[in-house]
Every structure is written in structure tokens, then in C-alpha cells.
Image (spheres, grey):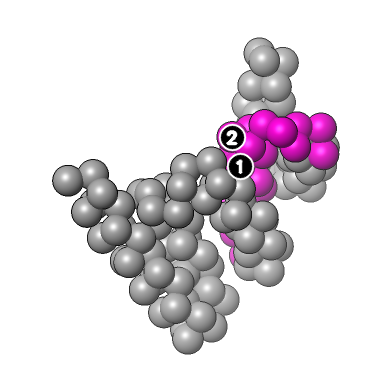
């Protein structure tokens, strides 16, 4: 397990060093190897998505967020703060991309998920 964590840390270092392509390769390789480990896949996809977003590669970032969302829903349940955050991030990506209608759809989903998860936690 420590070996896998080193790959995640190494990917973060590469993203901070602006070597996004290498980080993406590492993340994609981990996705292939660790299909049963949903948490590790989510972290790797998120690393790559945020790196691509920082490069203004909105389409690439969205593709990784769309990989994360169903896996995160499976792991955390459909009504969690984490899911709300993912919907909010996707909304921000669409907003940055200039697709304001889709941004609004995802912002509304994020708001609904936040309210739903708050209600369940009460």
C-alpha cells in the first residue's frame, strides 16, 4: 500500500513542477492497475483533473471528473458532501469553459446534494 501512496505523491510533485503529461501517464497507469481500489482511482483521477484544469484543458479535466463521479457515488453514496463538491467542481469547469447553461445545471445539482447530505446528517 505504501508503494501506491508514493505514486500518488509523485503525481502531485509532477503537477506542481508543471510536468502534467508525466503525471497523467502515472495516474492512468494506476487507474488500469487498481480498478478494485476505488479510493485510489478517485485520488489519481482528481490529481489529473485538477492538473489539466490548471492548464486550462477543460475538456480533459471534465473527462477525468466524469470518471470520478460514478466511482465516488459508488464509494460514498449518492447523497454526500464529497459528491456535492464534485458536482460543484464540474460546474466551475463548465463556467470556466464558457458553457454557462451546463455550469448552472451542475451548480444546482451540487446545491441539491449539499442540502440532501445535510438533511441526512441531522
**Residue in the image at 47% along x and 43% along y:** 76
Q: Is residue 89 left or right of residue 41?
A: left
Report the predominant secondary structure element of the magenta stretch.
Answer: helix
Range of residues picked out in magenta:
32-56
Q: Could you tell me if the residues under marks 2 and 1 are in contact, i.e. CB atoms within 8 Å?
A: yes
**Residue in the image at 38% along x and 49% along y:** 80
Q: Which mark is residue 42?
A: 1
Q: Is residue 38 above or below residue 7?
A: below
| Image position, residue 86 (x, y; %) | 48, 56
The local crowd at label 2, few if under 14, some if 14 to 19, many if 20 or more residues have their Cα within 10 Å, is some
| Image position, residue 87 (x, y; %) | 46, 62
The residue indicated by pointer 2 is 39
User: Mark 2 and mark 1: span between their CA atoms?
Assistant: 5 Å
Q: Is residue 24 above or below residue 101?
A: above
Q: Quadrant of the N terminus?
A: top right
| Image position, residue 60 (x, y; %) | 70, 62
**Residue in the image at 42% along x and 62% along y:** 88
> Who is closer to the viewer here, 60 or 114?
114
| Image position, residue 64 (x, y; %) | 67, 56
**Residue in the image at 66% along x and 13% along y:** 2
Q: Is residue 40 magenta?
A: yes
Amino acid at each position: 500500500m505504501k508503494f501506491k501512496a508514493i505514486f500518488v505523491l509523485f503525481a502531485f510533485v509532477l503537477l506542481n513542477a508543471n510536468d502534467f503529461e508525466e503525471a497523467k501517464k502515472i495516474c492512468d497507469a494506476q487507474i488500469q492497475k487498481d480498478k478494485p481500489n476505488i479510493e485510489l482511482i478517485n485520488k489519481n483521477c482528481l490529481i489529473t483533473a485538477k492538473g489539466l484544469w490548471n492548464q486550462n484543458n477543460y475538456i480533459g479535466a471534465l473527462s477525468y471528473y466524469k470518471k470520478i463521479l460514478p466511482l465516488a457515488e459508488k464509494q460514498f453514496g449518492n447523497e454526500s458532501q464529497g459528491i456535492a463538491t464534485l458536482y460543484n467542481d464540474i460546474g466551475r469547469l463548465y463556467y470556466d469553459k464558457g458553457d454557462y447553461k451546463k455550469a448552472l445545471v451542475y451548480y444546482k445539482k451540487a446545491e441539491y446534494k449539499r442540502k440532501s447530505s445535510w438533511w441526512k446528517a441531522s
